[in-house]
Image (cartoon, rainbow, N blue to C red):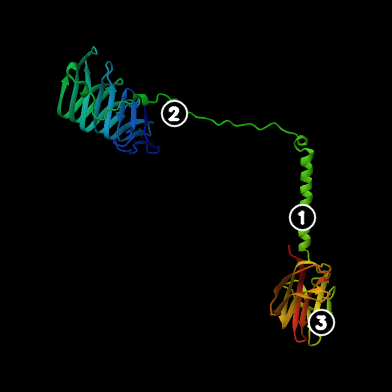
């Protein structure tokens, strides 16, 4: 037995196999085709909207089949060119122990065309009839007997008296050319398999031949330029102040006292310094560097009480102030930053913490002066 359908569902536990028809556009639609599920058993072709095959899971054999709606059974006449045909609403078939179909019932609105032959295989006539039920017995792969129950009408015609245009029932579709007779036939309608050509690797080129002298020189020059550029960026980001935490070393003061305290820095690890004005007036602390031009950024962490100023200033000449920030100190740490550009006039740069009064409390930590790209 073989078959095909739009969709096949198999339940190995229950032994039920379902061949299901997928609805297609109506016959009036362009390019539409109506192909119902189909089964071939020996010389018999069966079609319908849905086909169920029931297996006996204990004996591991076919048990029965049911064709639902538009059931159609066709077998070719053994000697002539005609076809034995039976159709109806439903078909129920039974299998013997050899998995051969031996009993078929066509139920409701059954029609048949059957070629009768005698013992000498001579054609006796062609029977065409309508019945409520048709029972078919099959033996040795051929229809042995046809029984019509509740026959409505029918007649047996000599072949010469039976019009050729009436020898086909409505819905007839002989599909023997689709029948798979081997595993290979299952794939005969598939497009040919085209395997892509996999290109192998190119021949190996030794490194000394691939990297010529000119290319090697360009690579080395690029590495050197990147290294110089990297060092330049690092230098610009380097802290230009020689002492960022200790405000006694390298810092100069006027009227300011630097005191070491046990107050912790923002990192909760280091102890910080405190500055106090010795008297009223402009008391200040400053640190100068050797650079004479560029764009500079001065940053410092502060907390305390009072108001002071942060300044970027010319160190020498007329002591021009390039940037001034007034800072109202708070009781929690905060980072303050100012930036300014200085042209090259031969004078150096310095940063100042000024306007420190004797009533102010100023804690300082982590000062830095960097050049901006």
Mark carried by residue 187: 2
Q: Of residues 36 and 340, which is closer to you in this image?
A: 340
| 317 sits left or right of 149 in the view | right
**Quadrant (top left/top right/bottom left/bottom right) for the N terminus:** top left
Q: Position of residue 268 (x, y in %)?
A: 73, 72
Q: Image point 48% across, 28% down: which residue?
A: 192
| Of the image marks 3 and 1, the number of the one nearer the N terminus | 1
Q: Image point 21% across, 23% down: which residue?
A: 165
Measure how far apart labels 3 and 1 are at the Cα level: 41 Å
Q: Of residues 314 and 271, which is closer to you in this image?
A: 314
* Mark 3 vs 1: CB contact within 8 A: no
Residue at the disc numbered 3: 256
For the residue labelled by badge 1, is the local secondary structure a helix, a strand or a loop? helix
Q: Position of residue 65 (x, y in %)?
A: 31, 32
Q: Image point 78% across, 58% down: which residue?
A: 232
| Of the image marks 3 and 2, the number of the one nearer the N terminus | 2
Q: Position of residue 32 (x, y in %)?
A: 33, 35
Vertical placement of residue 332 versus 84, above or below: below
Q: Image point 79% across, 39% down: which residue?
A: 213
Measure how far apart labels 1 and 2 are at the Cα level: 66 Å
Residue at the disc numbered 1: 229
Q: Of residues 208 and 317, which is closer to you in this image?
A: 317
| 276 sits left or right of 22 in the view | right
Q: Residues within 10 Å of mark 1 (few under 14, many from 20)?
A: few
**Quadrant (top left/top right/bottom left/bottom right) for the C terminus:** bottom right
1 or 2: mark nearer the eye: 1
For the residue labelled by badge 3, is the local secondary structure a helix, a strand or a loop? strand
Vertical placement of residue 1 versus 29, above or below: above
| 47 sits left or right of 284 in the view | left
- Based on the displayed image, in which of its 4 quarters is residue 190 positioned? top left
For the residue labelled by badge 2, is the local secondary structure a helix, a strand or a loop? helix
């Amino acid at each position: 037995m073989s078959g095909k359908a739009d969709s096949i569902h198999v339940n190995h536990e229950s032994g039920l196999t379902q061949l299901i028809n997928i609805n297609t556009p109506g016959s009036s639609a362009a390019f539409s085709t109506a192909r119902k599920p189909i089964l071939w058993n020996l010389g018999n072709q069966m079609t319908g909207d849905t086909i169920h095959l029931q297996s006996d899971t204990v004996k591991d054999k076919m048990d029965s089949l049911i064709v639902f709606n538009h059931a159609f059974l066709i077998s070719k006449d053994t000697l002539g060119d005609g076809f034995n045909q039976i159709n109806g609403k439903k078909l129920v078939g039974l299998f013997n122990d050899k998995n051969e179909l031996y009993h078929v019932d066509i139920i409701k609105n059954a029609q048949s065309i059957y070629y009768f032959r005698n013992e000498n295989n001579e054609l006796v006539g062609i029977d065409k009839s309508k019945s409520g039920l048709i029972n078919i017995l099959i033996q040795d792969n051929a229809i042995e007997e046809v029984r019509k129950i509740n026959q409505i009408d029918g007649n047996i015609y000599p072949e010469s008296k039976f019009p050729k245009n009436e020898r086909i029932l409505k819905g007839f579709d002989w599909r023997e050319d689709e029948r798979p007779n081997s595993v290979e036939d299952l794939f005969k309608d598939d497009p040919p398999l085209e395997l892509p050509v996999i290109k192998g690797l190119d021949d190996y080129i030794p490194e000394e031949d691939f990297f010529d002298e000119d290319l090697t020189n360009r690579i080395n020059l690029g590495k050197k330029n990147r290294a110089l550029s990297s060092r330049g960026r690092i230098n610009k980001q380097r802290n230009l102040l020689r002492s960022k935490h200790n405000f006694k070393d390298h810092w100069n003061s006027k009227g300011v006292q630097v005191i070491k305290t046990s107050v912790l820095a923002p990192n909760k690890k280091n102890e910080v310094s405190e500055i106090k004005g010795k008297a009223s007036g402009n008391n200040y602390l400053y640190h100068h560097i050797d650079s004479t031009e560029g764009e500079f950024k001065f940053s410092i962490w502060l907390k305390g009480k009072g108001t002071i100023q942060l300044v970027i200033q010319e160190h020498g000449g007329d002591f021009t102030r390039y940037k001034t920030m007034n800072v109202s100190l708070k009781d929690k740490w905060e980072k303050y930053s100012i930036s300014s550009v200085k042209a090259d006039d031969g004078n150096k740069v310095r940063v100042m913490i000024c306007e420190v009064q004797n009533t102010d409390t100023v804690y300082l930590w982590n000062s830095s002066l960097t050049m901006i790209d």
